[in-house]
Amino acid sequence: MPAFRATALSALGLAAFLVFWEAMPRLGLINPAFLPPPSTIPAAFLKEIALGVWGEAVWSSLSHYVVGLTVGAGAGIGLGLLSGMFFVFEAVTAWIVRLLRPIPGLAWVPFAIIWFGVQPSAAVFIIAIGVFWIVFFATQGAVRGVDRDLVEVAQAFGFRSPWARLTKILLPAATPGILVGLRTALGQAWMAVVAAEIFGVPGVGARMMQASSLLSTDIVVVYMLTMAGLYGLFDTGFVALQGWLLRWRA
């Protein structure tokens, strides 16, 4: 019963939000060119599909998203493990991390254009940068948070090499923390997609900029909702994978 009540309240809240949104432009309180009513979105969506634009934009963005997420997360996990396991590595890279970490992904756009041109690889680079730091710090913190008693017990049983400590103790114990970072990165990567495609790389972000320049805000909303829907699918799938990987905790 509590679950049904929560679902009903959520649906009621969403319905109230949509009614409020619809009323603002209908009553003339907001210019429909600046904020279209939600009732106009389905027609704009069908138009984009009929033109074949929606499928191409989504496919392009998905390719950038998946590759950028994979590269950024892979580098974040790898370097995060090194930093968490070895004090020397952390000390050597500490000032480099402090120097580069505050720089937002959008600030790398000029270099992405110079290095890669207006190509998908430039978008992948921006997305990877946005994902890397989240996964890096999540991995580093998860490894550092492993109970030192477990490491000592492992060494007592002969697991003395770094590889043995990593595979037998550190990685299994740190996996829950790493997965939390990866789930956060799923959302961050989608936010980076728009920034990565804003300078002309084909995709959802580029299509949104084209539509906004023509004041076709209904098309902009279509792609905003598309990104929200895709993130929901990815997040749901990741939660299911997370539950399967951590089934031993049940």
Image (cartoon, helix red, strand yellow):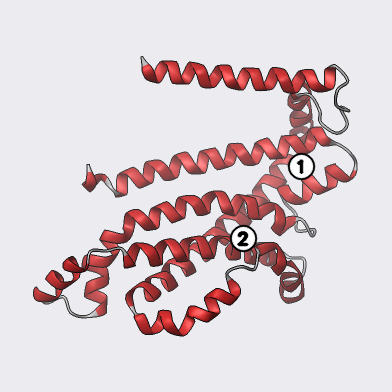
Q: Are marks 2 and 1 in contact (CB under 8 Å)?
A: no
> Residue 12 placed where, x, y %?
57, 16
Q: Residue at x 60, y 74 (%)?
A: 100
- Looking at the picture, does residue 189 appear above or below residue 77? above
Q: Quadrant of residue 25?
A: top right
| Numbered tag placed on residue 185 in the rendering | none
In the depicted view, which residue is nearer to us: 247 or 101?
Answer: 101
Q: So how many labels did they put on this image?
A: 2
Residue 19 lies left or right of residue 213; in this view the side is left
Vertically, is 115 above or below 125?
Answer: below
Q: Which mark is residue 127?
A: 2
User: The disc labelled 2 sits on which kind of residue?
Assistant: Ile
Quadrant position of residue 115: bottom right
- Among the two numbered marks 2 and 1 on one chain, the one whose residue lies closer to the N terminus: 1
Under circle 2, the secondary element is: helix
How would you rate the neighbour count of disc 1 (Cα within 10 Å): few for under 14, some for 14-19, many for 20 or more?
A: some
227 relative to 202 in the view: left or right: left
Find numbered disc 1 in the image and state the secondary structure of the residue it sits on.
helix
Q: Is residue 175 left or right of residue 6?
A: left
Residue 117 spot, x, y in % from top left: 76, 71
Query: What amino acid does circle 1 point to?
Result: Val
Image quadrant in which the C terminus is located: top left
User: Which residue corresponds to the image point at 51% horizontal and 54% vertical from the top-left?
Assistant: 185
Q: Residue at x 73, y 65 (%)?
A: 119
Residue that badge 1 annotates:
53
Judged from this view, the residue extending furthest toward the left is: 157
Picture quadrant of residue 193? bottom right
* Viewer-nearest of discs 2 and 1: 2
**Inter-mark Cα distance, 2 to 1:** 22 Å
Instruction: Decide if residue 226 is on the left or right side of residue 162.
Output: right
